[in-house]
């Protein structure tokens, strides 16, 4: 079979880690499989590079930032290829651009447009291992781009799709996809299977185990994805598939603790509201929970919405520059908020999930400020300081009886 094996930063943190991962790769090849490998930067290298940049220029331009960040994965790929060679396993490393990872021209958060995998394919057909740097690509102008934090997963799935691989296996520091972050909830359970839809919802609502674009791509191309532990690879892990409905309404609890809640006061309910969201979208700001409530004058209301904390400055800039045109009276930003969500495909036809969630929060005297529901999820917004306790209470209510 043809397999893509992806290793995250914690699985490559030191020379010993790289060796252990390389042994898994060599063993897979020895079974007669064609093996492409995607690597992340070692340990917290990416954070360290960001910090190095900040010491020199707090606001570096996107191009130079990407030039720097690409170095992390480039180190990993070369070290991995050398380690494989040392084990007697022939291997060739490739930067994103060499592996044909073509992206849009958006520094820091580029989407993959297509993969031209000829060189990688050739190496696989020669019986060698291709080691590809994750998280990076090249745009139409020949500039290096990066795919957003956690983006190596997306490289792996996109490559698997382009190579028509039989399997894309994501090796990580936990056992698979859990019912909640196992670092927060000791009793969290590993799922043996989860549907693409549920996983997508979990990933985009803050579960860090997989990059949400990786899940999107996997669903679109029907890539078989498996998440398992590098440290105990013999235990099964979690398989992603199209099946859902396990007789369980709630499948997971996700928490995003980098959320701001923005409230715009005195905003007209006609074209003004529409214009405001257009301006935010044009600036590439993604919005989640939106709540509109009547103000003191019927045609002018209060609109609240959640945004990622990373977009704080962009949001403030949009609001300041549009206040006069849209004629709203003011805005307010609550920082240090979190969004806690319960996710499950069986939720749409079950009832009582919201009630169960609110009851659990009430027991801990946690009062969410905003509540919103979707087909596969219910989310509450609350202060970040209460987020972990909220996750534990909700997990106990749905999974620990
Ligand atoms: N090294 C990048 C990051 O830390 C990409 C990845 O690990 O997936 O975000
Ligand atoms: Mg990751």
Image (cartoon, helix red, strand yellow):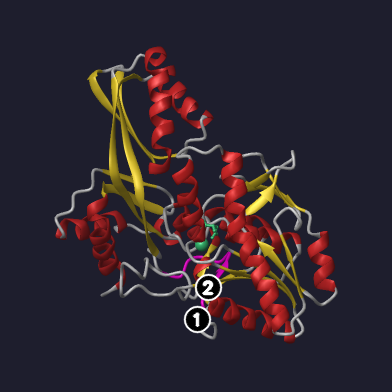
Is any atom of residue 355 visible in this view? yes
Q: Is residue 209 above or below residue 59?
A: below
Image quadrant holding the C terminus, namely bottom left
* Residue ID at (57%, 55%): 151
**Furthest residue toward front:** 56
Q: Is residue 319 above or below residue 65?
A: above
* Residue ID at (69%, 82%): 26
The stretch in magenta equals 236-247
Seen from the viewer's position, the closer of residues 328 and 139 is 139
Image quadrant holding the N terminus, namely bottom right
What mark, if any, has residue 12 been given in the picture?
none
Q: Main secondary structure of the magenta part?
A: loop
Q: Is residue 100 left or right of residue 367?
A: right
Task: Check if mark 2's residue and mark 1's residue have beta carbons within 8 Å.
Answer: yes
Residue designated by label 2 = 11
Seen from the viewer's position, the closer of residues 85 and 179 is 85
Circle 2 SS class: helix
Counting labels gives 2
Residue 177 on the magenta segment:
no
Mark 2 or mark 1: which comes first in sequence?
2
Residue 237 on the magenta segment:
yes
Image coordinates of residue 152 in percent, x first then y, are 59, 59
Q: Is residue 340 left or right of residue 103?
A: left
């Amino acid at each position: 079979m043809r397999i893509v094996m992806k290793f995250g930063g914690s699985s490559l943190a030191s020379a010993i880690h790289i060796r252990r991962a390389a042994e898994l790769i060599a063993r897979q090849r020895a079974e007669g499989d064609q093996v492409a490998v995607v690597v992340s930067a070692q340990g917290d290298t990416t954070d360290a590079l960001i910090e190095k940049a900040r010491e020199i220029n707090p606001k570096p331009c996107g191009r130079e930032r990407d030039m720097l960040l690409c170095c992390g994965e480039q180190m990993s790929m070369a070290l991995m290829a050398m380690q494989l060679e040392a084990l007697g396993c022939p291997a060739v490393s490739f930067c994103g651009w060499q592996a044909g990872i073509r992206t849009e021209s958006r520094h820091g958060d580029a989407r993959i447009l297509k993969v031209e995998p000829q060189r990688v394919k050739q190496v696989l057909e020669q019986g060698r291992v291709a080691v590809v740097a994750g998280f990076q690509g090249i745009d139409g102008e020949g500039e290096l781009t990066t795919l957003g934090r956690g983006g190596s997963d997306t490289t792996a799935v996109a490559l698997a799709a382009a190579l028509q691989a039989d399997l894309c296996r994501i090796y990580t520091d936990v056992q698979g996809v859990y019912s909640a972050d196992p670092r927060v909830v000791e009793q969290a359970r590993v799922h043996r299977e989860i549907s693409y839809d549920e996983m997508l919802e979990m990933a985009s609502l803050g579960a860090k185990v997989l990059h949400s674009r990786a899940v999107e791509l996997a669903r679109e191309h029907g890539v078989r994805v498996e998440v398992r532990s590098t440290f105990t690879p013999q235990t099964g892990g979690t398989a992603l598939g199209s099946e859902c409905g396990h007789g369980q309404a709630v499948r997971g609890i996700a928490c995003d603790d980098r959320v701001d809640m923005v409230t715009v006061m005195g905003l007209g309910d006609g074209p003004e509201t529409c214009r405001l969201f257009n301006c935010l979208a044009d600036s590439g700001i993604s919005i989640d929970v939106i709540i509109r409530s009547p103000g003191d004058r019927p045609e002018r209301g209060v609109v609240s919405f959640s945004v990622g904390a990373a977009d704080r400055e962009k949001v403030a800039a949009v609001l300041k520059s549009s206040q006069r045109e849209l004629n709203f009276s003011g805005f307010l930003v609550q920082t240090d908020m979190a969004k806690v969500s319960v996710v499950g495909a069986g939720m749409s036809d079950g009832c009582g999930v919201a009630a169960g969630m609110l009851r659990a929060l009430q027991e801990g005297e946690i009062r969410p400020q905003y509540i919103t529901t979707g087909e596969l999820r219910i989310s509450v917004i609350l202060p970040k300081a209460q987020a972990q306790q909220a996750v534990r209470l909700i997990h106990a209510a749905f999974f620990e009886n």
